Amino acid sequence: MVTIIGVGESKFGHRLEGSAREISFEAFAEAMNDAKLLSKDIDCLLVSSSSIPGAEVEKGNAGLLATYFGTIPKPAFNVEASCASGSVGVRVAWSLIESGLHDVVAVVGYQKIGPPSSVKGGINDMMWEVPLGADHSVFFSLYSSTYMRVHGATETDLNSVTVKNRKHGSFNEKVAFKEPVTMDQIQRSPYSIPPVRKLTVADETEGSACLILCSDEKARGLTDTPISIKGIGMGAGSRSLAGRDSLMSLSALENASRDAFRMAKMERKDIDIAEVHDMCPILETLSYESSGLVAKGQAAKQVYDGQMEIGGTLPSNLDGGMQSYGHLPGVNGIQMIGGLAKQLRGDERKNIQARGAETAVAINLGGAASYATTTILAR
Amino acid sequence: MQFEKFGNKGYVSSSKINGFVEALANGKIMGANCRKCGEFYFPPRSDCATCLSQETELREIDPNCELLEFADVPLTEKHERFVVGLAKLREGPKVMARIPVDQASGLKVGAKMKLLPVTYPDGQLSYELRK
């Protein structure tokens, strides 16, 4: 069994003071202090990274961070899976520890916005669909329209995701967007592409997150509050929109969740809290349904009814989610899993602590949901 | 003819199925059949994911299709308004393509449409969904 013994985050924002390596160090140092370790104790460093258009990505940045963090001569390398890079980094770390190759692995992700680059449409099919105008906004619009038409949901139902997560984020000192938003503000904001409002799409921000993982045996001497990874699944689906069987579910996530729950030997009803990929409300909505946490066609209504808030049936994105942190492909998955670990440990988080929670699931998507991971934690 | 001629703005310059673009210039939309197992692909491919053959043959598709969903993309500082549709070809595969703005009025999911070739004023080649 693999255990999380250290959790760290930088502050998040549009323009942070500091270089990529310095912002990454904020998260690394916090996680290492949490684990009560020093750099020499790390057996392997994984850097989750993915370049959004305009991102400042230093080539070979795992080597650069290993040098800056002081983990050399231990192995260091990059893991990339678009917006799921963070959780895939955790999955790779998990496999390194399970295999016995390494005892203590650090996973760090960062995002720093640089000068505009020529990279376009990285999450869609560059040969057949990007040349016709496909991008993440088209992806969100097509899925949202389908959900509303098939299930009779309204914009208000879907956009309740943003209101909820920004409300949760207002209690979190580290998020980029600390101000809550009202449904009225959303409905008065311009459309990205109907029926999706700009205010409901997570903006690109800067920041870093880090986790320290180790084997159960090793954790016994290091922490009184180990959080175990009980199940970890990943699936892949069609990158092209036309190649998908349905716009009503996320097939990669269906597979990831099936495998994760099977590995954990748990049922969906056993989950107490969740962090769910919320770059846009339709993704959080479909993630509940494709993972099996909520019945098909019910998720938007349940969010609207408050079931995903503290006191509801499945409190979700209690840290504020991507709606509050922003969209950081290499970071979000690590932050989600770290946030859940802190919730399960019962770390003090004023007004937004899911008291008594024992199990949690993190759902992270990437590449227009062509990648998906499901990570199940328990204390 | 290079593959970057395909679409409103091409990003991929070289492909083993450049014949698709040449056919488009001649008013034909091609899919591909695997020469070994017969699997049909649209968009066309040079390699078969079913039997791993690297020999496929271009052939003209049936343009008839049904609209599954569409997105009406508003005017921004970066681009004009445009409409993108997702349709299911009668032959089975799905296609994402633009719908001319003058065809977007009263558009409904389930509408019968055709996938037709188009040459834009700047010489770029593509296909569009039309009623």
Image: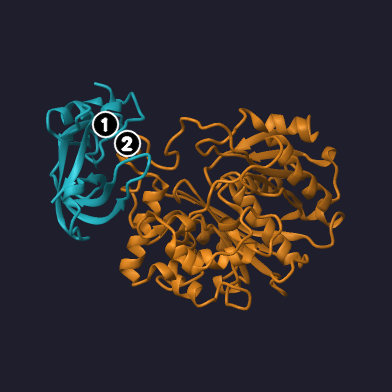
Chain colours: A orange, B cyan
- Determine whether, in the image, residue A190 is placed left or right of residue B81: right
Residue A305 visible in the displayed image: yes
Q: Does residue A316 lie above or below A100 as drawn? A: below
Q: Does residue A249 lie above or below A18 as drawn? A: below
Residue B90 visible in the displayed image: no
Q: Does residue A252 lie above or below B55 as drawn? A: below
Quarter-wise, where is residue B7 in the image? top left
Q: Residue furthest top?
A: B1
Badge 1, how many Cα within 10 Å: few under 14, some, many 20+? Answer: many
Quarter-wise, where is residue A251 in the image? bottom left
- In the image, what residue type sits under mark 1? Phe
- Determine whether, in the image, residue A158 is placed left or right of residue B34: right
- Determine whether, in the image, residue A185 is placed left or right of residue B22: right
Chain of the residue on which disc 2 is drawn: A
- In the image, A51 versus B102, the foreground residue is B102
Q: Residue at x 78, y 31 (%)?
A: A72
- Determine whether, in the image, residue A159 is placed left or right of residue A345: left
Marks 1 and 2: in contact by CB < 8 Å? yes
Chain of the residue on which disc 1 is drawn: B
Q: Does residue A337 lie above or below B34 as drawn? A: below
- Residue at mark 2 to residue at mark 1: CA–CA distance: 7 Å
Quarter-wise, where is residue A295 in the image? bottom left
To which residue does mark 2 refer? A131
To which residue does mark 1 refer? B6
- In the image, A315 versus A258, the foreground residue is A315
Mark 1 secondary-structure assignment: loop
Q: Position of residue A307 (x, y in %)?
A: 54, 76
Locate the N terminus of chain A and report the quarter of the image it occupies: bottom right
